Amino acid sequence: MKTIVLIFAELLAASLLQVGKASDVPGRVSYEKLKDGPWKIQRWDERYPLVFLTYGGQWPAQDRIAHECKKQSLLTPTWEDPKFAHPIESRATEWGWSMEWRPSGCTTRRECYEKVKKQYLERIRYRQYPGTNDPLIKQGEKFYMLSMQATYLLCGAEWGCDMVGIETGENLGANNILTTFVRGAARQSCKPFYVQPSPWHMGSVPFYLPGDDDTTQHQLTEEQIKAALGHEAGAIPNGGHSSYYLFREWYHAWLAGAAVVCPEGCQSNFFAGNEKRHQESPPDVTIPLSPIGRRAQKFLSLTRRHPDIGVPYTPFALMFDEYCGYTGFREQVPCPWNGLKPSWSDWEIVLFFEALFPGHMELVFTPETMLPPRDERYKTHVHPERVSVPTPYSEGYDALLSSVPHDVLKSYPVVICLGEHEFLPQTVGKLVDYLRYGGRLCLTYQQAAQLGMKGGQDQTTAFQKLRQAGKVDLYGLKPSEIPTDVDSSRWTRWGRLVVYEPEKETEDSLQARHEATKLLPHEERFVKETGQLLGHLCAEYLPVRVSGNIQYTLNRTRTGWLIGLFNNEGATKTHITPVVIDPSKTQRVTARAKEGNIKSAREWCEEKEVPVRNGEVTVEVPPGEVRIVELIAHE
């Protein structure tokens, strides 16, 4: 039996070199088997390759806007489909009005897990808003769970919902990581997933006057700004997130495999001018589109022309313990379940993601005056942030829990264990079976020590069983390299919301803040060694080499590979200013299949052929924009 490592290598060779049929070579996995196995994109409705709509799609008071969205091809008009089950938010999330933010009275990870699970299941059972008798979800209706905290996504999908979802944009950062968790949750539980890019930022949302573009400068008085921001979501010119950012989020979600992409607030921000007047206008009058609306029209048109995006290629599984409680939320990273005292293993998760997605946590307590300018980063007196970042190690990662079914786990060539693990007997047994099947396991030195790396004379340790079963790599720091007097209090400063009061700052306090953001030598070493591991794995398992300062995704198609390119630089905006475009931030990107030849290439956004020279293609991605390149190896 060929190992799963060789299976994926042969899959690449078969697709790019066409060396015989899949059935001619023992152990070779065909594209159809990959497409229809655990990696299959789960659809909310199999009749729709992608659903692009807002909220539940049911607009009892907005028929005029729904009519316009269909007329101008801005949304998927599922409201006209009587057979379409519009997804309803369950409120079974981590938010304060629905779930206890930090499980009180709990002292262990398992206690927190059980308490959160009980609350979650109660929300599903009662199917209503807290404090009301009116059910939000009627029996038989399909509902989704929305969360922005990492293991809540994985657990919630496992405990019960019809679809798992995330919100992006807003004031949230680390979108790369959120996608890793929501897609992993969907694959582990065989459910579709949902992404809701929000235009809201720091109290403002976009409002466009007719003729406006993102770069249009409006002279707003301080009183106007304060009046708008005094509301929960004040619509003002130059407010909120830009169409550049929202556009990238829609494409990123689609290529990641989302079944539903929700352009939040689109009833108003797709159009220029007063929403109330639009509602009252005759149906035969065409309502002028805003920059966001024009982007939506282009996005929906492209997804209809290219409904088949293949399979998001994610060969690396990041496995977390079922009771780990990693939230990924800035205010409490790395405290398990938002409140327990973190261990070094919890901090390793943050450092691992810092190696994978450099700058993802952006050291949020550093004042903006000390940070270099970032693109599509919104500087306020609260917390500057990076919303998405490029990585040299691809986005080929799915987060899973240790409770993952074996049939799902074995579809990943590599499993990387992260964070605090109990390594229960059933978990070790599952990993032994995974290795025997041909997988590859990566453990930290501390995890290996916990499993009995040194061994004993009288019995075989769990670590020895794993080593005997297959290939096990060790990474990170050895226990002897980790200080015994680790001060975990400084870690939470990475994620603690700290108000920056410039009038109270001095040169000394600024310098103290700057010093506090620096990693200690042993932390820097962990990040460096993790980067080396990721570099070796990507060199071995990624079929396409992409060069350039770019965020990119990779999908396997019937005829080759699909590369999504996202330029997060060069379109700079705050929550109350227009977009500033820097043409010098255009990114020149090259892509090459590591084996075989590319017959032809096509770019989808501009619908044009891309020349192939010496087996390589080169594409320019303008500031803030998206390009999608299809590499065709065979018909």
Image: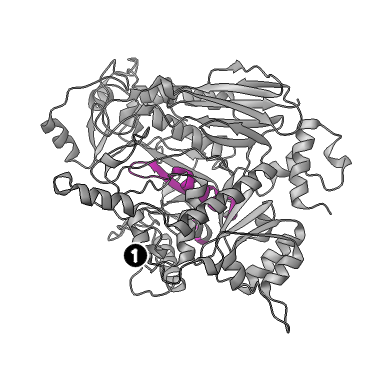
- Point out residue 106 in the picture as x, y percentages from the top left corner: 38, 74
Residue 606 among those drawn in magenta: no
Q: List the single residue furthest toward the bottom.
A: 458
Q: Nearer the viewer, residue 24 or 189?
A: 24
Q: Is residue 121 above or below residue 306?
A: below
Quadrant for the N terminus in the image: bottom right
- Asked whether, in this view, residue 512 is left or right of residue 19, the answer is left
**Residue 110 visible in the displayed image:** yes
Q: Residue at x 67, y 29 (%)?
A: 592
Q: Which residue is mark 1?
A: 489
**Residue 309 visible in the displayed image:** no
- Point out residue 105 in the picture as x, y percentages from the top left corner: 34, 75
Where residue 169 sits, quadrant-wise, is top left
Which three-letter amino acid code belongs to the residue tagged 1? Ser
Q: Residue at x 66, y 22 (%)?
A: 601
Q: Is residue 384 above or below residue 90?
A: above
Q: Nearer the viewer, residue 533 or 226?
A: 533
Q: Secondary structure at mark 1?
A: helix
Q: Is residue 207 above or below residue 608?
A: below
> What is the number of callouts on the image?
1
- Point out residue 615 in the picture as x, y percentages from the top left corner: 71, 24
Q: Nearer the viewer, residue 526 or 379?
A: 526
Residue 171 among those drawn in magenta: yes
- Point out residue 163 in the picture as x, y percentages from the top left corner: 50, 49
Q: Is residue 231 above or below residue 471?
A: above
The magenta stretch is 159-188
**Colour logic:** one colour
Q: Residue at x 63, y 26 (%)?
A: 630
- Asked whether, in this view, residue 170 is left or right of residue 426, the answer is left
- Asked whether, in this view, residue 239 is left or right of residue 6, the answer is left
